[in-house]
Amino acid sequence: MDYQTHEVRDIDVLVIGGGIAATFAAIKAKEAGARRVVQVDKGTVGKTGNSCFAAGVIHVCFPEDDLDDRLMRLTRAEGYLAQQDLIQDHLQDSYPILEDMRRYGVRLVMNPDGTYGRMAGRGAYPVVMFYSTQLMDALRQHAQAIGVEQVNRLYVSELLAGNGEVSGAVGFHQYSGDFYVFRSRSTVLATGSTYYKGIHPGQRDCTADGFGMAYRIGATLCGGEQNDQPANAMPARVDVGPGMNKWMGEGAVFRNAKGERFMERYSPKLKERSGLPQIIAFFCIEARMGRAPILMDATHLGPENMERLYQMLPLPQREFESIGVVKDGKFQKLVEFCPTGPTTRPGVVVDRSYASRTARLFAAGEACSPSAVVTGLAAAATSGARAGASAARCAHDSNGIVGDNGLVGELRERAFGPLARAGGLEPDHVLLELQEAVIPYDVLLLREGSRMERALKRVETIRDQDLPMLGAYDLHYLRLCHEMRNLVLTAELQLKAAIQRTETRNILREDYPFTDNVNWLKWIMVRKEGDRQKWWTEDIPIERYPLAPKREVELAYLWRVPRDLGIVSIQDGRVQWEFEK
Amino acid sequence: MGIRKIDMKLCIGCNVCVDVCPLDVIRLNPVSKKAYIKYLRDCQSCFLCEVECPEDAIEVVAVHERRMVTAW
Ligand SMILES: Cc1cc2nc3c(=O)[nH]c(=O)nc-3n(C[C@H](O)[C@H](O)[C@H](O)COP(=O)(O)OP(=O)(O)OC[C@H]3O[C@@H](n4cnc5c(N)ncnc54)[C@H](O)[C@@H]3O)c2cc1C
Ligand code: SF4
Ligand code: SF4
């Protein structure tokens, strides 16, 4: 293979990723005085990841909002597994970040009097709206304008690390095949999360690469079993979405196979505007009772609703039109919905400056553990901003870039390995196997120990037998091979963490329906030590945080609701389904 | 797998669709200088190429044509 190797040296801050966390990190690193900031994306900055396709709303804590109340809601959504100090920082920063966005050229929906137009979304506080892909376009352009160097179509395969610190990253260009070595004083990992290339548009490049890269250099990860949003919900049989927030905000409803508006039963107050943990849990319970499919009914929406939807969700609305669901400005058909793949994430453990536990490595956005960064554009942006500024400080204080003692040659070989096995297994084939192991709702969304053990065995077989045989016809497939490796690792870490958490917190578990605030106010951590995988737990410093649950064991709220509705009972510490009796 | 076609008569080879596609589905033919669908199977029907093509040369349809594994 005669691909060249290029060295990009003397970088103060290397930012990996092209989403909102990464772009904010790059901008804020520059603003904090870093001289050379390089941002690398496997696609084109601003056109990739979740950020580009987010559904038009930003959750910002306005000065007039009750910050303590918002902190409580986010902490509860995380089942008290949140790093509350970081969540507080995020809420405090979110309004100034919104103002930054406007300064950088992002168009937001404003009232005629110049104040922000806020609209009811899911959740208790009204949201701010933006115009689809314009948001990331504006941020990309602003980053370029202030001198951030952006490298597109470069797949970062590994971090460069030695002597316990990170000194850059390596990867290959997907068009030229050239191998790049980035040497940096500090590095921000903002590579997002994953949905296992599942059912919705705009996520097939979210492939958990950062979790894999960080794990392989021995960074500490946490949160594989939890998230404030255990999954998303999307149109199931068509490539449309995301937009649930907005469709529900405009008055769409969910119906089960019997035509019942079931969310009224489970969540009489918020109904379809309940939080995602509730929506996902109640979807799963309906499915378990044989009442799937679940359909979104928006046929009653009027012209005003539709106009707003077209403004805020131009892509999904266009997608619906292309398949005849929306015609003549109206929803004509019901749309089947289902949960996406699980979105709990074994993210990088960070402190308040978004520094990881490995020197010179920072993380932002969904590359972080869920306890540190909640799902959403706002938290990705605020964490990116802090990570970028911290990384700039770290670069400033550093006295040079550490060498790599021959590592680069090995990483180059590893990067191109699958090209030498062009006749090997196709990444798509392995992807299907992996999806079948982890996406079914009764594995990681409606959990049960033996089902998860079975799924884990399957994932381990894929890891041991399929991954070494992955082959790439060309550079495009080479990227897919690397993505597969990271997805399989992520599935393994997710399942192992989920099996260890023997309780129901914000995700249903049939064999442990109780929330155990005596023994399980803990984070489950993992790190690679040599060839070993080291697992341990750390107590959440709950007494130092503003909010703490009662230290008791009680039936989880998500099970109390179906129990009170007579759908399940609890016997011998397990859930018993009434319809199975 | 939603990208259906790129109209060769309309395409002016500006490379915009190649740049914006998150999944590297589209490439420019070095000889004809027109865009073509190279890795159809990876298309995620995100419509970015269709929306950003200055000549309206691209058609995307939001149906799954690959096998999709769903939650149920
Ligand atoms: C369906 C859906 C709808 C949503 N709607 C909203 C909404 O309306 N409002 C809201 O606030 N939030 C929404 N969110 C959540 C929000 O989009 C995400 O939380 C946020 O965008 C995460 O940003 P990020 O920068 O951490 O990751 P991402 O935006 O996913 O960015 C990750 C980046 O890393 C790059 N990358 C990954 N691996 C590599 C590699 N190996 N080499 C180089 N680059 C790499 C990717 O190309 C990408 O640019 C939605 C999420 C989903 C899934
Ligand atoms: S964006 Fe349109 S005109 Fe430009 S290369 Fe692509 S298809 Fe051709
Ligand atoms: S629809 Fe999206 S994924 Fe498909 S070719 Fe166009 S830009 Fe690429």
Image: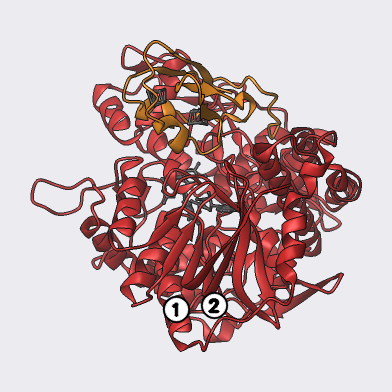
Chain colours: A red, B orange
The three-letter code of the residue at mark 2 reads Ala
For the residues labelled 2 and 1, the Cα–Cα distance comes to 8 Å
Which secondary structure, mark 1? Answer: helix
Q: Residue furthest left?
A: A113
Whether discs 2 and 1 lie on one chain: the answer is: yes
Marks 1 and 2: in contact by CB < 8 Å?
Answer: yes
Which secondary structure, mark 2? Answer: loop
The reply to whether residue A517 is visible in this rendering is no
Residue nearer the viewer, A299 or A515:
A299
Crowd tier of the residue under label 2, counting other residues whose Cα lies within 10 Å: few below 14, some 14–19, many 20 or above: many
Quadrant hosting residue A438: top right
A476 relative position to A312: left or right: right
Q: Chain of mark 2?
A: A
Quickly name the residue at label 2. A355
- Residue at (39%, 62%) from the top-left corner? A24
A289 relative position to A115: left or right: right
- Residue at (62%, 75%) from the top-left corner? A166
In the rendered image, residue A134, in percent from the top left (x then y), is placed at 31, 43
Q: Which of disc 1 and disc 2 is earlier in sequence?
A: 2
In the rendered image, residue A337, in percent from the top left (x then y), is placed at 57, 30
Quickly name the residue at label 1. A390
Quadrant hosting residue A228: bottom right
The three-letter code of the residue at mark 1 reads Ser
Seen in the picture, residue A485 relative to A168 is either above or below; the reply is: above
Residue nearer the viewer, A181 or A393:
A181
**Number of numbered markers:** 2
Seen in the picture, residue A561 relative to B25 is either above or below; the reply is: below
In the rendered image, residue A205, in percent from the top left (x then y), is placed at 58, 43
Seen in the picture, residue A472 relative to A60 is either above or below; the reply is: above
Q: Chain of mark 1?
A: A
